[in-house]
Amino acid sequence: MFYPTFRARRIRGKEVFRRMVRETSLSVNDLIYPMFSAAGQGIRKEISSMPGIYQQSIEHIVEEAQEAHELGVPAVILFGIPETKDAVGSDAYAEHGIIQETIRALKKQVPGLAVITDVCMCEYTDHGHCGIIKDGDVDNDETLELLAKEALSHARAGADMVAPSDMMDGRVMAIREALDNNGFKHIPVMSYAAKYASGYYGPFREAAESTPQFGDRRSYQMDPGNRREAIRETRMDVEEGADIIMVKPGLPYLDIVRDLREEFDLPVAVYNVSGEYSMVKAAARNGWIDEERVIMETLLSFKRAGADLILTYHAVEAARLLKRG
Ligand code: PBG
Ligand code: ZN
């Protein structure tokens, strides 16, 4: 392939050619929209570090979910901001907890929309950690019981899929067993398989009010330097019955997305996390980047890296842009 016989620019010369030979594309079917459901009524509070994203009470969640659904977004993933938090995260598995009530409202009012739930303790514990604290650290095995209870209560409320994000060892098996033994064999588990201890979660913790009150999450989330470990972590989840595997964060971990794509044949999801969203919004507000272009290029990069599904706060705006074409 030598110049001048071959000219790479020939096929780039017309938009119609570029469209014909494009190797990857983004579809609205790939998008999952994260939402923050707050206990109470009449709440719609913008998260200061995430312009366009809100903590909202159920009636507003339903409204925005309806809009997402009409734009063709297939699914939302829910995070809860409960009325009260305690040491064991009781609201996480309460029959009338914030998420359970949100699921019921969504399944009733927007039945065509898939409702996925984040299964973790940190939004519901007063100490902000993803599990039960014992001797100053999160106790793995005791936490498993609560996670299983939480996932089961989501399924009972009508959740279509559960997504554990806690990073305890054995959680997929514990959740799978609880679902199977209680009539929910058909409910898939999307596991946050390779989840790194990341500074990019900062804005989310403001949104979910889930900042750890002491220490950090490095004893359970993965170390950012590790690549082989992502395969090992993910293999555990696959063997325990995960249906979809996830990499999180997204942009700084595209190599891991590619690794999981090549190693496993399950659908791969990637979480374009809060800090990634905030950086785009901040730069756009300063007029430093072309916002729409950067959003679409970012989402396409996840597909090119090998992801099938993208959890992103840009889902609704991206759906609108895809529609406009
Ligand atoms: C809870 C959870 C977090 C995110 C999703 N689920 C935060 C964390 O682990 O601290 C982060 C999402 C984001 O930053 O957008 N375990
Ligand atoms: Zn957590």
Image (cartoon, rainbow, N blue to C red):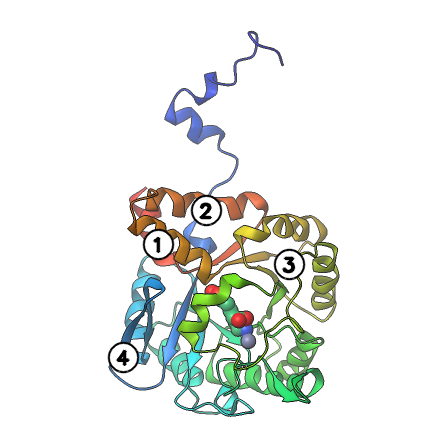
The answer to whether residue 299 of the structure is visible from this angle is yes
Taking depth in this image into account, of 277 and 7 the one nearest to the observer is: 277
The answer to whether residue 162 of the structure is visible from this angle is no
Q: Is mark 2 within 8 Å of ligand 1?
A: no
Of mark 3 and mark 1, the one earlier in the sequence is: 3
Q: Is mark 3 on a helix, strand or loop?
A: loop
Is residue 207 toward the left or the right of residue 188 in the image? left
What kind of residue is marked 4?
A: Ile
Q: In which quarter of the image is the C terminus?
A: top left
Q: In which quarter of the image is the N terminus?
A: top right
Residue 154: give x, y in percent of width and height: 51, 82
Residue farthest to the top, as pictured: 4
Residue 207: give x, y in percent of width and height: 40, 72
Kindly indicate whether the residue at mark 4 contacts the one at mark 2 (C-beta within 8 angstroms). no
Of mark 1 and mark 2, the one earlier in the sequence is: 1
| Mark closer to the observer (1, 4) | 1
Q: Tell me the quarter of the picture where residue 215 sits.
A: bottom right
Is residue 282 toward the left or the right of residue 198 in the image? left
Taking depth in this image into account, of 253 and 154 the one nearest to the observer is: 253
Of mark 1 and mark 4, the one earlier in the sequence is: 4
Mark sitting on residue 298: 2
Of mark 2 and mark 4, the one earlier in the sequence is: 4
Disc 4 designates what residue? 43
Q: In whole angstroms, how far apart are the C-alphas of marks 2 and 4? A: 31 Å
Disc 1 designates what residue? 282
